[in-house]
Image (cartoon, rainbow, N blue to C red):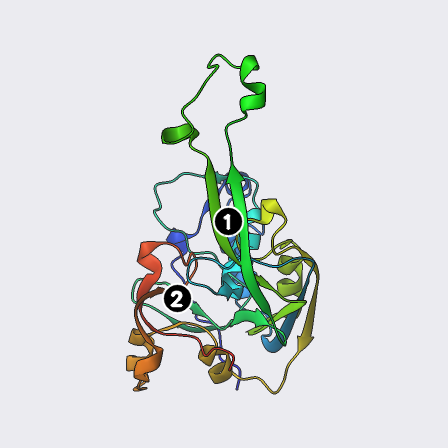
């Protein structure tokens, strides 16, 4: 059975966009967007992203589908007013499994993972002082052994795969609209990493909420409320479980996603 969306997301933590001041509480503000999305028919979806280049995973090593959708949703508004909110809640066209007492959403969206065999290696980013053009600068020489002008060679782990896949429960049209705004996955997209050629979104009636939750980080607080135990090998004392995954307030004790064998 497809779970119904939770209707009481903390709207006071939605971002405040410049357009929202013009349109008030209408269709083009975050509250209006959430009112439309929360009543859309949600269905299980299989999502496949075809890649043109290897991707560099975030610090926790996973590509989070709800994180990608949140970034795409936030990009719909060209500018966001700094209204003192430390951490935004971004409404998404997905079903919700749970919301924490603070209102943080546990979306029914899995991590993205490589399809089939994937190769892993290293790539290097370099930063060097342009000594060949130093005669054009005020500073003719610079210390390149230490400090701000130090030469840098940064190793990064790259995963090379033809495509990645994930699952979610949500509205197909709205999810497609957001993914059409996602042109790369992982870090260093400006350097050509994780470039997305296309997205395919198809119904997946064989997938249920339990399968999706097994393939994403789930807070222990949710599992405790459901009376579910956590295998010790899948328990992590502190990892992100809701967008933005990098923010300290998004981290807690979690059951980690089931990885490919």
Q: Nearer the viewer, residue 260 or 174?
A: 260
The part of the image, by quadrant, that contains residue 234 is: bottom left
Is 97 in front, or is 50?
Answer: 50
Disc nearer the start of the sequence (2/1): 1
Residue placed under numbered mark 2 in the picture: 241
91 and 260: which one is in front?
A: 260
The residue sitting at 55% across, 61% down in the picture is: 121
Number of other residues with Cα within 10 Å of mark 1, as a class: few under 14, some 14 to 19, many 20 or more: few
Q: Alpha-carbon neighbours of circle 2 within 10 Å: few (<14), some, or many (≥20)? A: many
Give residue 100's position: percent from left, percent from top. 33, 68
Residue 220 rendering spot, x and y as whole percentages: 30, 75
154 relative to 8, above or below: above
Please say whether residue 166 is visible from this viewpoint: yes
Farthest residue toward the front? 145
Q: Which mark is drawn over residue 25?
A: 1
Q: Secondary structure at mark 1?
A: loop
Q: Is residue 139 left or right of residue 194?
A: left
Q: Position of residue 7 (x, y in %)?
A: 44, 68
């Amino acid at each position: 059975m497809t779970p119904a969306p939770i209707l009481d997301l903390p709207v006071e933590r939605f971002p405040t966009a410049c357009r929202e001041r013009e349109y008030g509480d209408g269709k083009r503000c975050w509250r209006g967007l959430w009112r439309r999305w929360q009543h859309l028919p949600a269905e299980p979806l299989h999502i496949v992203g075809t890649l043109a280049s290897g991707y560099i995973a975030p610090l926790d090593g996973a590509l989070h589908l709800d994180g990608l959708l949140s970034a795409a949703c936030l990009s719909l508004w060209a500018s966001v007013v700094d209204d003192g909110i430390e951490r935004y809640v971004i409404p998404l066209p997905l079903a919700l499994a749970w919301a924490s007492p603070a209102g943080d959403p546990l979306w029914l969206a899995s991590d993205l993972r490589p399809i089939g065999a994937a190769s892993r290696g290293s790539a290097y980013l370099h930063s060097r002082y342009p000594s060949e053009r130093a005669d054009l600068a005020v500073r003719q020489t610079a210390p390149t052994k230490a400090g701000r002008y130090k030469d840098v060679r940064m190793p990064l782990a790259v995963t090379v795969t033809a495509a990645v896949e994930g699952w979610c429960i949500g509205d197909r049209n709205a999810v497609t609209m957001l993914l059409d705004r996602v042109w790369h996955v992982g870090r260093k997209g400006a350097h050509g990493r994780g470039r997305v050629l296309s997205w395919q979104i198809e119904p997946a009636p064989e997938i249920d909420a339990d399968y999706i939750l097994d393939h994403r980080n789930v807070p222990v607080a949710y599992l405790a409320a459901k009376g579910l135990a956590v295998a010790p090998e899948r328990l992590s004392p502190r990892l992100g479980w809701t967008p933005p995954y990098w923010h300290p307030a998004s981290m807690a004790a979690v059951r980690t996603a089931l990885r490919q064998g």
